[in-house]
Amino acid sequence: MRVFPDPILRQRARKVTQFDAKLAQLAADMAETMDAHHGVGLAANQVGVLQRMCVVKMEDWEEALVLVNPEIMRREGLREVEEGCLSLPGYRGMVNRAERIRVRYQDLTGKQQRLKAECMLAQAVEHETDHLNGVLYLDHLIAHDQFFRIHVNEEGDVEYLPTGEPDAAELEAAAQRMNGRNIAPRSDLPQFDPSNGRPAARQTDDAGVAD
Ligand code: ZN
């Protein structure tokens, strides 16, 4: 798994033109890697391959969906969601994502397919398509302070700690600490003011410093 700040995560993947057994094998390997990390999506950049292919798998699916050369044709609505990334283990952030999307992609035989997606699936496809363009969810943070480091305490509770930019050593340590644990989103995130997209007034320990 390639982890931030690996430069391949910032590169644009190339269009897939060969629909052969090698491509199918890569898709199968990616699906396996995604499952092993309890992810809901994985893009080829994340396993060090600059090809426009990603896999997504919702919790109740038996098999991963493989999207080759995916293109988001239409986005509708906007919602604020919590997001994480296997290439940024131990972190979570609040981002804006579409409510519904329409996607055009090719399957492993090269056939053109279309997909309408909403909620978590739409979020996953947006996230993975971003990866293929060298974009990370960090680029979509609602606000600079809406990025959190996750800490699992001795009781097994998940705590969210404010953080600045992630650094490589910290990420590596977090990856080891988490060791594939699937961290559920927390339910008590601050509310956001829809008029300006900023967090509503929230409690802070920094002696009255406003954001
Ligand atoms: Zn990701």
Image (cartoon, grey):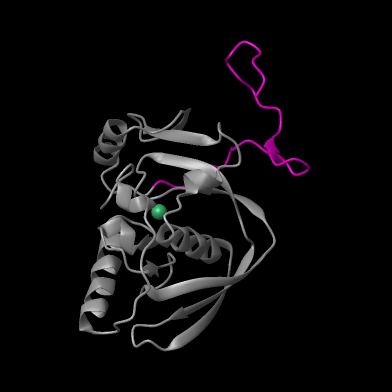
Residue at 40% of width from left, 50% of height from top? Answer: 85
Residue at 26% of width from left, 37% of height from top? Answer: 172
Q: Position of residue 166 (x, y in %)?
A: 39, 33
Quadrant of image for the C terminus? top right
Residue at 71% of width from left, 33% of height from top? Answer: 200
| Number of marks drawn | 0
Q: Quadrant of residue 75?
A: bottom right
Figure check: 34 above or below 176? below
Please say whether residue 188 is one of the residues in the magenta stretch.
yes
Q: Nearer the viewer, residue 124 or 46?
A: 46
Q: Nearer the viewer, residue 186 or 66?
A: 66
Q: Quadrant of residue 203?
A: top right
Figure check: 103 above or below 152? below
Q: Position of residue 39 (x, y in %)?
A: 36, 57
Give the magenta range. 183-211
Please say whether residue 200 is one of the residues in the magenta stretch.
yes
Q: Quadrant of residue 208?
A: top right
Secondary structure of the magenta portion, mostly? loop
> In the rendered view, does 84 fall on the left or right side of 144?
left
Q: Position of residue 142 (x, y in %)?
A: 60, 41
Q: Can residue 158 be spotted in the picture?
A: no
Q: Can residue 97 be spotted in the picture?
A: yes
Figure check: 91 above or below 99? above
> In the rendered view, does 20 fall on the left or right side of 123?
left
Figure check: 154 above or below 66? above
